Image (cartoon, coloured by chain):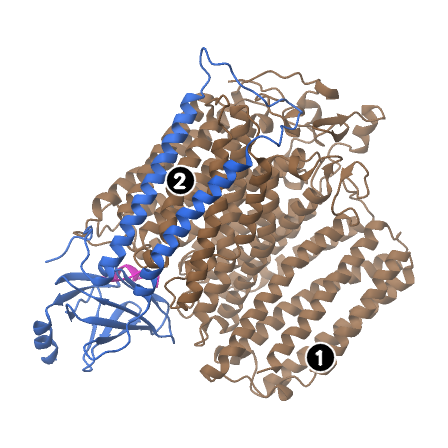
Amino acid sequence: MIESKLMLEAVSVTSARWWSLFYLYLAVALAASAFFVIWIIYLVVSTRPRKGRPETNQIKPGVIPSSTRGNAKVVLYLVVFLAIVFYGLFFYTLPTSYYLKNVPSNTNGDLNITVYAAQWTWTFKYPNGYNVTTNALHPSTIRFPTNTTIVFKVTSEDVMHEFSIPAFDVKVDAYPGVWNSAWTEVTVPGTYQVFCTELCGIQHADMWSYMQFVNQSSFQTWISSH
Amino acid sequence: MQGKRVDDNLMGFKTKSSQEYNYVNSVKRWLFTTNHKDIGILYLVTSLVVFFIAGSLALMMRTQLFYPENTFLSSYYYNQFVTTHGILMVFFFISAFAFALANYVVPIQIGAKDMAFPRLNALSYWLYLFSAILFISGFFFTGGNIAGGWYIYQPLNQVQYSPQVGEDAAILGLIMLSSSVIVSTANFAVTIALKRAKGYKWLDLPMFTISIMFTIMMMWMAFPVVATDLVLLFIGRVLGSTVLLSPAGGALLWQQLFWFFGHPEVYIVFLPALGIMYDVSSHFSGMPIYTKKFMIGAFAVETLLSLTVYMHHMFMTGTNLFWLTISNINTMAIGIPAGVLVLGEVITKVKGTFRPETPALFTVGGVIAFIIGGASGIFLASVALDSGFNGDYWVVAHFHYIFAGTILFGIYSGLYFWFPKITGKMYSEKLGRVHFISSFIGLNLLYFPMFILYDMPRRYYTYPAGLGWTLPNQIATIGAFIFGFSQLFLIANLIYSTVKGPAANGNPWGAWSYEWLIPSPPPEFNFEGTPMVKGNLLMVIPPVQTPHAVSHEHASGAHLSPWPMLVSLGAFVTLLGISLYIEGFNNYVMALGLMIFIIAVLGWMVDDYYDAFPSVEPDGDLNKETWPFSQMDSRKVGMWIFLTGDIFVFLTLLAASTFLVLQAPVFNIKLIDPIEAFPNFAVSSLVLIGSVGSMYSASRGAKNGNKHAVFGGLVLTVIFAAIYIIATLSDWSQLADAGYGFSKMSVNPLLSAFYDAGIVHIAHIVAAVSVMIYFAVKAVTGRPLTRTVSSSISSLFYFWVLIAIAGIALTGTFTMV
């Protein structure tokens, strides 16, 4: 079963936080954009040249137009308005940024997966030493447990890649010689995709794979058979 | 369609038919011109050609993405197209398009007869044209063109992973383009600083000129950095330098160095469009700009902040969250002046009468696109939300709304606005409106679906079915064709109206600034007399002599020069020759190019030796407003601006070196024992310090008119420079003997940084020394030490001080390992 990528509901703890933040931004963005777009169109239409409305023209050839037009307070209000919107969003976002970016410190129940990105495959290494290499052209089955904190430690063996699981809003760059981490905890079992989202060469578009998320006991059965 | 008729004789302006000024309408005129208006037209035509090439690449990519698993383009071509589309649009089109108008309009708007350095202006154009040809020629080399993304991330673009020679040609093209921009930056800065009409206050200048001024401030910091990045990359590809391959974070180093350029670049292309939209809105609503002073302040804040936000391109790099948060704060901060500027442009229309003609319509479309593009950008500024967007189509939608929406529409509005001025003909309003409406519909059909593709990775040449990506992609592709083909209305309009359009008078819009007070098209030297601002009146004081005497002084075609074109041609052939040599051809092409280059440089020098090319407007003209640079002439202002940029070149090298030096112990990289490495360090440092002294005496001598001091000082400096180069090369050969030669760069990033810095530094010395030899010859053969010569020699002194400091600082850095 393949989930549609247009799912707008959360399937992991990280994407739950991400979506609630996204909807807030979306509400603010839509309200503000709609207001300004409607205002602009109204302004343009209402001030068009037409009968019964005297035509204004304060621009005279060869005369520098007055630079004193306008009210400084309007600019001030605009600055304050934008600052409140932008920094309101910023402060509201801050806890989520830390939540997503701060990988939880290791506890016993966590699953640590080592991910090697290479042109143009993903290699997942499980704690028991089991390695799976996969991409769109040579897919292999990779399974992960739900309701478990999973930490991905990511590096690259050649060029830069980006480890990205859009369904969980997990994303981190893979550099040669550098280890980066990302984490999530999936709540809904299903099949998701991992993509490379940094151009990495000729087969960049094939550098993706399905990931199966199953409940913990099925995962244990699967992993212990390898 | 015509607006108000304006009396052309207003305030002492003389009307003359344009035929009188049509000096040499020939191939020679277009090849050798140094007139800012001709160069503006050349820029315009060239940038539009680039636009159509880059646009066709995009249409082919959109065709490929119409179906999942489509096979119209292979990934081999798709990756090349996606990369070259980005680079051509960002580097070769959008800025050049804006600067085409700036070239034509800015000198007239400030009341100047030409740019401060007309030949350098021509040089900028020809370097730009040939760099575009060189870049595009990359397609014809084995393995094709550059294919590693427009921000050329490392290590993918190293020769190990991208061996195609076309990429070398493309990088050389980009380096050439950067030099064109650097030359142009200094030229515009000097022109705006020193060539304004007397009495023209900074705050009274038209918004377009003001926006160009802030744009060049960013350009003179950003472009030297990207030029250095590309030189590091090229040396890496060709000589095996591994600075950008270092396991100590070479890939991350590139991101820092590239985005330091890359983000200001966004504002570099944004501000001119905004400036145009302000002026057009003001004219077409008949209202002065709303709180102009505050809006200029917002431009200034935007310029300053543009250097502080680039880390928001690097939210996924694993960099410390603290720094990412700082960048998030800065990005929100830069949104405030941006928002104020765009909304201020709209408020300008309030209470006016909005005449919905084509230029004005494009400003409305541009602002609406900005609201969509800007609002979607706020999502990306958030560290948290970016983990769902980075590298995906939401980003593509966001920046295309800004680039292809706001910026392109802004410049279009300027193009229609100034079209009657440039051609003397009125464009077709009908075609213009069709162009606007079809472009606006195409734009939204093309880019809005990409928001729905928020989780589809960028730069995938194909995508699987069943993920919900097909329909949005198909709508986007249809939109792309509507958008693409609607640009043909523009071309049709430009060609048809230039040939058959109704004649336009000097001021069809009833606009206020200087360009509208002179005939369309303007005469060769713009003004028949001296522009002067009294209070709030723009005036032209008629010449004291008879008009005929003036025409003789600036005889028709007097400022044609073949050298800018030939210098650029020489550079082009040389760089093409280098690419062919890498491809495996013999090096005759390279030799031929060098020959053309050297002959052209000598030709330029010979012209200068005989002072055969007088400035259109010499320094020290009391009819010019030069505050706050009254104490400096154009050469000095130009040199200071160039030096500011050059400081960034050396800072880039220093940053790369320091980065590696600091990382070296962590990653256990060793240079070699510094004492052993630089046996001549003491000698070369002393020689550099000594040469500063001798250069100073030459500079003093020039100021006092003492030819012997000039000659002696210059010759001594050249000798010191020669000793320095010999000492350095001897260092290098001893390093090679100790097993640390060029070939070892491939295994030692520190050594690579050392040689990279050395090569760039020595290139600087060679350039400076050639100019010194020229002035030494000029002084000893008895040419007069004019004010221009003396100011050039003092400028050369500043340049030399920078070279000396950089030499000691760079070598010093490596002794700290």
SS of the residue under disc 1: helix
| Magenta residues, start to end | A194-206
Q: Chain of mark 1?
A: B
**Front in this rendered view, residue A28 or B166:** A28
The chain whose colour is brown is B
Q: Residue at x 10, y 80 (%)?
A: A224
**Front in this rendered view, residue A116 or A203:** A116
Query: B667 above or below B692?
Result: below
Which kind of residue does numbered mark 2 sit on? Ile
SS of the residue under disc 2: helix
Q: Quadrant of the N terminus of chain A?
A: bottom left
Q: Earlier in the sequence, mark 2 or mark 1?
A: 2
Q: Residue at x 61, y 22 (%)?
A: B507
Residue B308 locus on image (x, y percent):
51, 57
Q: Quadrant of the C terminus of chain A?
A: bottom left
Residue placed under numbered mark 1 in the picture: B727
Residue placed under numbered mark 2 in the picture: B371
The chain whose colour is blue is A
